[in-house]
Image: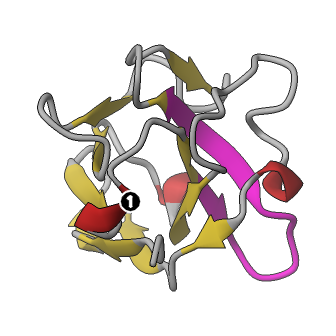
């Protein structure tokens, strides 16, 4: 099972930091494109950061560039992190981890397309208060 499981969400003050964790089954330890998306009610799901777990190449949305950092466990393809810094109330959302097909990399052209990902986590709430 590739089912991603997110953790690390919570409430933080404006300017604070949080670190999200996404894990998929150890039996799915193959390289793939993984990404973090976020969604607020009434708006489309937005891709914020992606990573190809083989090469470690990363992709970022302009809205979070310089404040968020996506990374992976150095030894395996099953764990991805999202370090979020200088958070603002506009970053409040449910954050979802998404995993693409095995042995398929990310692409600058489509890493933010939710349809490119086969597996989704349940989401973790991030709330930033002013």
Query: Could you say where residue 66 lies in the image, as x and y percent from the top left?
Result: 42, 17
Q: Nearer the viewer, residue 74 or 108?
A: 74
Side of 69 relative to 62 (left or right):
left
Q: Main secondary structure of the magenta part?
A: strand
Asked if the magenta segment contains residue 38, the reply would be yes
Residue appearing at x 76%, y 82% in the figure? 41
Q: Which residue is mark 1?
A: 28
Indicate the secondary structure of the residue bearing disc 1: helix
Query: Could you say where residue 125 lies in the image, as x and y percent from the top left?
Result: 43, 79
Residue appearing at x 62%, y 69% in the figure? 119
On the rendered image, what quadrant is the N terminus found in? bottom left
Query: Could you say where residue 100 lies in the image, as x and y percent from the top left?
Result: 64, 50
The answer to which image quadrant residue 108 occupies is: top right
Query: Could you say where residue 14 lies in the image, as x and y percent from the top left?
Result: 32, 53
Residue appearing at x 50%, y 27% in the figure? 52
25 shown above or below 60: below
The magenta stretch spans which residues? 37-51
Asked if the magenta segment contains residue 31, the reply would be no
Q: Nearer the viewer, residue 128 or 51?
A: 51
Side of 117 relative to 1 (left or right):
right
Residue appearing at x 54%, y 67% in the figure? 96
On the rendered image, what quadrant is the C terminus found in? bottom left
37 shown above or below 6: above
């Amino acid at each position: 099972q590739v089912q991603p499981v997110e953790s690390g969400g919570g409430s933080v003050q404006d300017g604070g930091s949080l670190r999200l964790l996404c894990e998929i089954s150890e039996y799915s330890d193959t390289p793939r494109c993984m990404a973090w998306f976020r969604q607020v009610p009434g708006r489309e799901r937005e891709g914020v950061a992606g990573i190809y777990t083989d090469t470690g190449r990363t992709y970022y949305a302009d809205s979070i560039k310089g404040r968020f950092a996506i990374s992976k466990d150095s030894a395996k393809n099953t764990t991805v992190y999202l370090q979020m810094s200088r958070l603002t109330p506009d970053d409040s959302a449910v954050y979802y981890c998404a995993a693409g097909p095995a042995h398929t990399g990310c692409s600058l052209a489509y890493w933010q397309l939710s349809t490119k990902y086969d597996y989704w986590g349940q989401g973790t709430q991030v709330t930033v208060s002013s």
